[in-house]
Amino acid sequence: MAVRSTLSQSPQRAALPRDRFSNRELSRLDFDSRVLTMAEDLARPLAERIRFLAIVSDSLDDFFQVRVAGLHEQLMASLRLTSPDGMTSEEQLEGIGARARDLIERQSATFNEEIVPELAEAGATIVKADDLSKGDRNLLAEVFKERIFPVLTPLAVDPAHPFPYISNLSLNLAVMVRDPERQQPRFARVKVPALLPRFMALPDGKRFVPLEQVIALHLPVLFPGMEIVSNHFFRVTRDADLDVDDDEAEDLMAAVQAELMRKRRKGRAVRLEVGPDMSPDVLALLLRELELGQQDVYTVSGMLDMTGLLSIHVPGSNQLPARMWMPATQPRLRPLSGDSVDFFEVIRDRDLLVHHPYDSFVTSVESFVEQAARDKDVLAIKVSMYRTSGPESPLARALKNAAQAGKQVVAVVELKARGDEQANIVWAKALEEAGVHVVYGLVGLKTHAKLMLVVRQEGEGVRRYAHIGTGNYNAATAGTFEDVALFTADPDVTADIAELFNYLTGYSRQSKYRRLLVAPTTLRSGLVRMIQKEALKPKGRIVIKVNNLVDPEMIDALYRASQSGVRIDLIVRGICCLKPGVPGLSDGITVRSLVGHYLEHSRIFRFGNEASPDILFGSSDLMPRNLDRRVEAVVPVDDPDLKKEIVQFLELELSDDTLAWELAGDGTWSKVATAKGLNTQALMQRATLGLVEDDREEAV
């Protein structure tokens, strides 16, 4: 695959080695492996271990629905493509299979050998339906009759009934039945209803039976007069990545809805999960009907779809609830008396930085929007939303109230946000009905920037106030994702954001901005230019914190800077295709990943070793999709105190020896040895509460 580059080429420069990239897909599975170690950590609370098991299950589902499905499409289309690291589609699928099976085995072992016994000790015993007493079975029979049986639909397969469509990520029973008269075996499929609880609680409230086992126990009720030969649990994963041609779509919402419906019905199967007792005959039938090969089968000795574990709760147990953190109000937003803080006065004084989940989303972002909606002098509110909390969230209500009060309210809603397409359609319709002007972004691009602009009448003119951040306008994720955001009234920054909104909502060829770096126009070239600028300094310094580092051009720019003597520290939560510490290539580059209770989500860029380096942050990761196929916004930080705060945070993450992992040049990750016990997330909580003066600075 050719690597696009805007780097200046010099005849004196040696060519970079061809094997300088790691494989993106395998690196993604390495991240899942790091998350799984959190579930394997016996020192962690049981609720957290269960949560991380569920996160791994959910992540693997997403990976197969999108990335593995894409590789399957390449094979079907006979496209002889190779990834930047040189692997073919076949080689990548083979490597994925080996890594994913190892993850599943570890996950199942953790569940069977540790989580189930610990749950029992905590007062929540997962029991098998076959092991129940006669009395328990009688009670379950009543529950089955009243609550489960009415929503089940057994589907037979015979000459009159074709093989049924198996919906994506559904849990199913493959049932073999035999007619006592004809003695001919038949296949039937029973879908486990997703709307019912995954576990049925027995009357004592301490024992729980998986729903699929309850159904299996009562199959004779579903197939009266038939002999139940066997039953097996299975789960199918399908291609779920939307392919909307918005160049051709006159109505983008209708196109997204139609594509969602098509994927639900026709998405090609890419993975079959089965239990270890699946019979060869039934497996062969499923593979034939689903058009899958043996290499697409994943045997799970634990529980299929461990996200269902999150529904178990033990009354009175102090082990199960996850550790709760109550975000604090950012100090400058705390009222000195009984009066509420005037947001506009605070921001007008100087820029304000908030750091979630340590600083409260409710008392910062939501309060800002609510005040803007109430303020009689506010003329307009504009917001760009990728993933949201839904049409009934405080933010949504504030936007509706502002529109109904006659203010100009514009919401750019990204309908193609993967996994949230349907939710965003509902959100968009609700806003439109309230009088908000809803825009669905640009043709051919996803709008991923996280921006809000408030226009306010002040004196003889107007002043603009803005919020720009790394996280979504979603109160739920703001409590679990680590993100940073800036509130500012800077005339240049707010003018840039105003012009960016005009670009998103109208006809514009805007390609230059005063302060912002914007994808797909100025962000790529701007970051490359800043990397190259550091390479010219005698003691260049770069620190970058992102979720994923994949883009070949950015990686090459960092390699060249390292060869020029720049010290580069990368904090990459997930995928990293750069190889650090390779002699002659990346001697001066380190890569670490922090995996903790909160999902490290902020994207921060530091350039310079001076007392006041250049600091930027925003919505973009270093991936081709972010730099070339999305609308992203990155803002510089000018306030010296805010710069110091961000530098201190980055140095803390680089000093962490509790949550941190390090990447070696051969692509392997290893846990950083704990010496001082520095835990970034715990220290950030303590510093936010003011428990220790300058706690973060002391740590680094």
Image: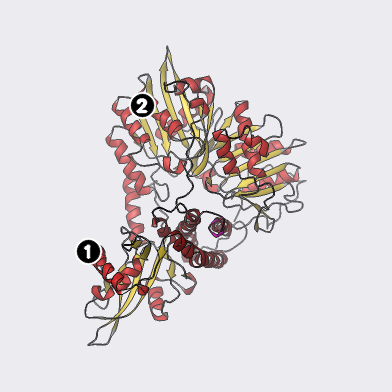
Q: 232 or 531: which is nearer to us?
A: 232
Residue 474 shows in the view: no
> Which one is earlier in the sequence, the residue at label 2 or at label 1?
1
Numbered disc 1: secondary structure: helix
Q: 506 or 403: which is nearer to us?
A: 403
The disc placed on residue 530 is none
In the rendered image, the quadrant that contains the C terminus is top right
- Residue drawn where x is 35% and y is 35% of the image: 396
Picture coordinates of residue 245, whole percent (x, y)? 39, 49
Amino acid on which disc 2 is placed: Ala
Magenta span:
38-43
The disc placed on residue 146 is 1
**Position of 213 relative to 8 (above/below):** below
Quarter of the image where one finds residue 639 = top right
Choose mark 2 or mark 1, whichever is in front.
1
Q: Is residue 42 magenta?
A: yes
Amino acid on which disc 1 is placed: Glu
Coloring scheme of the render?
secondary structure
- Provide the residue designation for mark 2: 373
Picture coordinates of residue 472, whole percent (x, y)? 45, 40
Picture coordinates of residue 461, whole percent (x, y)? 43, 15
